[in-house]
Amino acid sequence: MSHEPTGLPLYDKAAEDAAAAVIAAYSTSFGLATRLLGSRPRRHVRNLYALVRIADEIVDGPAAAAGLDPTAERAMLDSLETESLTAIEQGFSSNLVVHAFARTARECGIGDALIGPFFASMRTDLLTAHHDAASHDDYVYGSAEVVGLMCLQVFVNAGAPHPTAPEPGLVNGARRLGAAFQDVNFLRDQQHDEVALGRDYLGLGSGASNRVEVLDRIDADLAAAAAVIPLLPADCRRAVTAAHDMFASLSWRLRRDAAPDERVRVPDAVKAALAARAWLGFAPRHRHPVRARA
């Protein structure tokens, strides 16, 4: 007798497979980290990151390369947000990635309080090219910290009968880790962002900040996040530790190479070693003394 899924279960599976394919195509590091998640949260994290990736692509070049102007990009972004919120309410979307995200959002308690700021930051990319400290912080909250908070909702609530609010310490750690990831990527992509996209997220071009200040902030955020990783559910700690340590390695390499000729990356052998270290249960790594963040 066949037990293959049919109807909505088959559609749900196809949606989650589509989300996993998006992640596999875009990020080897993220794919490696998600494989360290337990089966309970793994598919949900893939589902939410797939939607985040598609929204990013609307504003970061592919949509423009296909011929869309900023007005059309804004309309597409607005449509994606509306469709996501509608799918959460109704439980279905004809867009497979949106459908997968909505399943995760419904189960894990992800709503407009996190989704709205994310899309607001994505729209900022269509309007603001040069950021000061205040606009940087607003942008990072919406583009990265809330993504960390979405992941935290998954870590705490996947498989639970009803979603509950995470502990405040975990909320702070999730925000700090998301901010660190985003600032590392800003430094890594600084030349591309300036030349190809005309953007300055960190105020480095205007002299509003300097690399050392940014790296000190990154390392302080990584340290704050590392302190609460042991408080996460056991089936999430390894993956979060691996992701933390990969970005700590990137921060160290960015500090070491003040003016890199190429985009700084972690060699595959080092990624594998960091993943193995996390799998064995070691605590997150600290490479540098850091200043406290105000």
Image (cartoon, grey):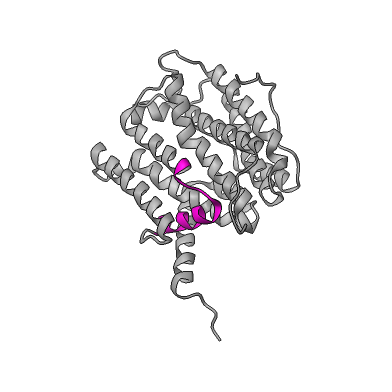
Q: Is residue 213 visible?
A: yes
Q: Residue at 24% across / 38% down in the picture?
A: 71
Count the marks: 0
Residue 240: x and y in percent read 64, 43
Q: Quadrant of residue 115?
A: top left
Q: The N terminus lies in which quarter of the figure?
A: bottom right
Q: Is residue 69 visible?
A: no
Q: The C terminus lies in which quarter of the figure?
A: top right
Residue 70: x and y in percent read 26, 37
Task: Judge by depth and name the residue closer to the eye, 163 or 132.
Answer: 163
Q: Is residue 273 above or below residue 24?
A: above
Q: Quadrant of residue 107?
A: bottom right
Q: Residue at 49% across / 66% down in the picture?
A: 13
Task: Judge by depth and name the residue closer to the eye, 44 or 181.
Answer: 44
Residue 98: x and y in percent read 41, 55
Task: Judge by depth and name the residue closer to the eye, 155 or 51.
Answer: 155
Q: Is residue 81 above or below residue 126?
A: below
Residue farthest bottom in this picture: 1
Q: Residue at 49% across / 50% down in the picture?
A: 48
Residue 218: x and y in percent read 58, 26
Q: Main secondary structure of the magenta part?
A: helix
Seen in the image, is 58 located left or right of residue 67? Answer: right
Task: Please tell me whether residue 271 belongs to the stretch shown in magenta.
Answer: no
Residue farthest top in this picture: 207
Seen in the image, is 128 located left or right of residue 6? Answer: left
Q: Quadrant of residue 96?
A: bottom left
Task: Please tell me whether residue 101 belongs to the stretch shown in magenta.
Answer: yes
Q: Which range is magenta?
A: 96-113
Q: Residue at 72% across / 43% down in the picture?
A: 277
